[in-house]
Amino acid sequence: MDQSELVEAVSEAGGAAVAPVDLRKELEEFLKRLNIETTCIEHPEVFTVEEMMPHVSHLSGVVTKNLFLKDKKRRVFLVCVRHDRPLALGELSRRLGAPNLRLAEERLLLEKLRVRQGCVTPLALFLDTERSVTAVLDRELTHGGHTHIHCHPMTNSATMGITPADLLRFLEETQHTPVILSFD
């Protein structure tokens, strides 16, 4: 999807087209208002966790894999797990009581979180003012003793680190009390 298609898709989804750099600035301002400190590194644009790992493997903490999913009832979920965690959608569907859980189409992602595939991040939940997205976190992220959780800051050309406590506070401030599941 090129930039003109992105603008059209966001417009059709009922939102205003905003460049990832502007969304990142909005996020940084939101975090600053909450007095949440983060670290951030720039890297080439990446579209998969595998592409990202060479750029972030030196960081202290845990890197996330983030999936934007929907179920048969049209409920939407943002699932964040440790980057190397295998994820069985059938099992997750059962545990969440979400029949026929599957990847959501990019138009729905743009409508709800204003990010494209490859940029999915728990930090985009500050844009879900309708609170229609259920956050699902791997217990390892928040209770695994990691110094930082690393995810994209609204763009896939950077990685932001946030402490587990601050991520939980961020989710609380955005009124997205997460479902925390153990995937061991």
Image (cartoon, rainbow, N blue to C red):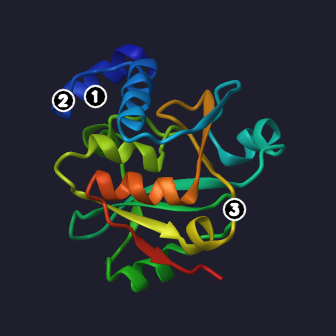
Q: Residue at x 65, y 43 (%)?
A: 48
| Relative height, residue 96 to residue 144 (above, below) | below
Q: Position of residue 50 (x, y in %)?
A: 74, 47
Q: Are marks 2 and 1 in contact (CB under 8 Å)?
A: yes
- Viewport quadrant of the N terminus: top left
What residue did someone put label 2 on? 12
Reading the chain from its start, which is encountered first: label 1 or label 3? 1
Q: Position of residue 144 (x, y in %)?
A: 66, 71
Q: Can residue 67 be seen in the rendering of this structure?
A: no
What residue did someone put label 3 on? 146
Q: Residue at x 60, y 79 (%)?
A: 183
| In the image, farthest residue toward the front | 35
What residue did someone put label 1 on? 9
Reading the chain from its start, which is encountered first: label 3 or label 2? 2
Q: Give the distance between the C-alpha atoms of the residues marked 2 and 1, in whole angstroms.
A: 5 Å
Q: Position of residue 148 (x, y in %)?
A: 65, 52
Q: Residue at x 50, y 78 (%)?
A: 181
| Relative height, residue 138 to residue 113 (above, below) | below
